[in-house]
Image (cartoon, rainbow, N blue to C red):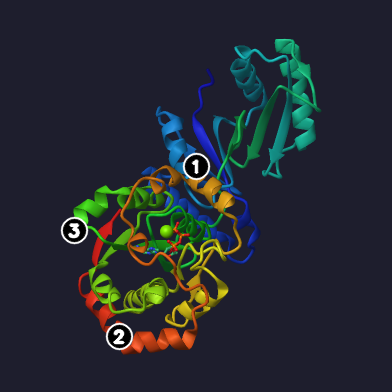
């Protein structure tokens, strides 16, 4: 077993954004430190976590869920002494049952006397001689990655893929309409991936908030919170709208509900400073998500509505939900509001008609009524 003493963390896209680079790097460092409860060090182009005898696998899970990380790896730090580096790598490879390998060197310390290729060749030769292994540049069974940094060497054997994206908090706050379905958790996650702090708003038809928090809604909020630095779940009651729904033309109920949700989120955005509203709509996935309906509903919010799933197929969304870890909860039984409402919704809502229904039935008051007891829960 290799005795890893560090974790090397690399970021890609954020390193490309020239002007803002230090800002992104510092933010990623701060986010990781908060999640891991540990201090990191920033070397050129990477972050380093020193392991203090703890299991890197436990930390790994948290790093894997941090946006902005492109890849990371458990690594062995060796002070800048090539003989020492050779010895350590040979020691680590000795118990490995591989027959072929190659060395790949990345040099970010340009003052180091050997070029990347020279160091790779030198290491390759001594490892090969010592352990009787074959160097295979085309198809090696094992790759020894060596990083030459200003403060010493790091070597590693496996790169673990991160999520990419941008560090949480680099893009402002949005409010995501969360249902119990498969789509809206994925939509929320995609906004998180672009650096947003995403809070959730769920309209529930349960008797108590505890019931909602213990349901899949609470579980989905928990899973999503692990990708950021925590989040707030706002719970609003379905009751005011439900009571009103009996007075609405049956065919229009679902579209009016959508307009109502947009307006509710818009009002909350205004009050709490969210810069956008997020929904899990995917174009024409269901009868209510036609361009006509999305158009009519969008009229009810001054705050921009973001729909990151708009161009995705159901299967793509499902695959992503599985990767995120929300799918298994989304498919559980739940009494969702939409299911309680009309079965055959209007597919081409006329914006004027929708506005008339809104005015005639005082839906603004229903929004007002709902806003009176929205509760916040922090995850
Ligand atoms: P999802 O899988 O997210 O439920 P869906 O394709 O089933 O999406 P609908 O149920 O028609 O779509 O809802 C469209 C969007 O409206 C959802 O993605 C979500 O953003 C929002 N939404 C639906 N129901 C609720 C709710 N009870 N509370 C908050 N937002 C909701
Ligand atoms: Mg749904």
* Residues at marks 3 and 1 touching, judged by CB atoms closer than 8 Å: no
Residue 224 percent across, percent down from the top left: 40, 51
Q: Quadrant location of ligand 1? A: bottom left
Give me the residue at 52% from left, 17% from top: 1
Label 2 neighbourhood size at 10 Å, few (<14), some (14-19), many (20+)? some
Pick whichever of labels 1 and 2 is earlier in the sequence.
1
- Disc number placed over residue 361 in the picture, else none: 2
Residue 12 falls left or right of residue 47:
right
Give me the residue at 40% from left, 31% from top: 52
Which residue in the structure is indicated by mark 3? 207
Q: Secondary structure at mark 1?
A: helix
Given residues 373 and 70, the one toward you in this image is 373
Give me the residue at 59% from left, 47% from top: 70
Kindly tell me whether mark 2's CB lies below 8 Å from ligand 1: no
Which residue in the structure is indicated by mark 1? 64
Residue 38 percent across, percent down from the top left: 39, 43
Pick whichever of labels 3 and 1 is earlier in the sequence.
1
* 239 lies above or below 65: below
Label 3 to label 1: alpha-carbon separation? 37 Å
* Residues at marks 1 and 2 touching, judged by CB atoms closer than 8 Å: no
Residue 348 percent across, percent down from the top left: 52, 77
Label 3 neighbourhood size at 10 Å, few (<14), some (14-19), many (20+)? few
Given residues 242 and 325, the one toward you in this image is 242
- Locate residue 16: give its quadrant: bottom right
Q: Secondary structure at mark 2?
A: loop
Q: Secondary structure at mark 3?
A: loop
Pick whichever of labels 2 and 3 is earlier in the sequence.
3
Label 2 to label 3: alpha-carbon separation? 25 Å
Label 1 to label 2: alpha-carbon separation? 49 Å
- Name the mark nearer the viewer: 2 or 3: 2
């Amino acid at each position: 077993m290799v005795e890893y003493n560090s974790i090397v963390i690399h970021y890609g896209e954020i390193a490309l954004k020239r002007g803002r680079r230090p800002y992104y790097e510092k933010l990623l460092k701060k986010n990781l430190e908060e999640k891991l409860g540990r201090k990191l060090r920033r070397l050129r182009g990477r972050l380093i976590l020193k392991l203090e005898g703890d299991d890197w696998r436990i930390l790994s899970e948290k790093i894997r869920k941090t946006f902005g990380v492109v890849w990371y790896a458990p690594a062995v730090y060796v002070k800048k002494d090539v003989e020492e580096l050779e010895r350590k790598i040979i020691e680590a490879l000795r118990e490995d049952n591989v027959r072929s390998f190659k060395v790949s060197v990345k040099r970010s310390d340009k003052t180091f006397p050997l070029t990347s290729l020279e160091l790779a060749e030198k290491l390759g030769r001594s490892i090969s001689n010592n352990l009787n292994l074959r160097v295979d540049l085309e198809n090696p069974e094992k790759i020894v990655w060596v990083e030459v940094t200003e403060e010493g060497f790091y070597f590693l054997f496996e790169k673990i893929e991160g999520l990419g994206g941008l560090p949480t908090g680099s893009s402002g706050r949005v409010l995501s309409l969360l249902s119990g379905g498969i789509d809206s958790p994925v939509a929320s996650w995609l906004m998180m991936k672009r650096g947003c702090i995403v809070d959730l708003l769920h309209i529930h038809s349960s008797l108590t908030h505890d019931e909602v928090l213990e349901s899949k809604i609470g579980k989905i909020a928990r899973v999503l919170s692990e990708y950021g630095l925590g989040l707030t779940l706002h719970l609003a009651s379905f009751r005011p709208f439900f009571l009103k729904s009996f007075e609405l033309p049956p065919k229009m109920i679902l579209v009016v509900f959508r307009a109502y949700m947009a307006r509710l989120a818009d009002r909350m955005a205004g009050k709490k400073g969210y810069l956008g509203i997020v929904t899990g709509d995917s174009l024409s996935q269901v009868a209510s998500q036609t361009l006509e309906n999305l158009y009519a509903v969008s009229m009810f919010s001054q705050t921009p509505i973001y729909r990151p799933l708009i161009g995705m197929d159901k299967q793509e969304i499902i695959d992503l939900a599985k990767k995120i870890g929300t799918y298994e909860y989304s498919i559980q039984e739940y009494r969702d509001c939409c299911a309680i409402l009309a079965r055959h919704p209007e597919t081409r809502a006329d914006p004027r008609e929708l506005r008339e229904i809104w005015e005639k039935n005082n839906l603004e008051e229903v929004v007002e009524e709902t806003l009176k007891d929205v509760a916040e829960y922090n995850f």
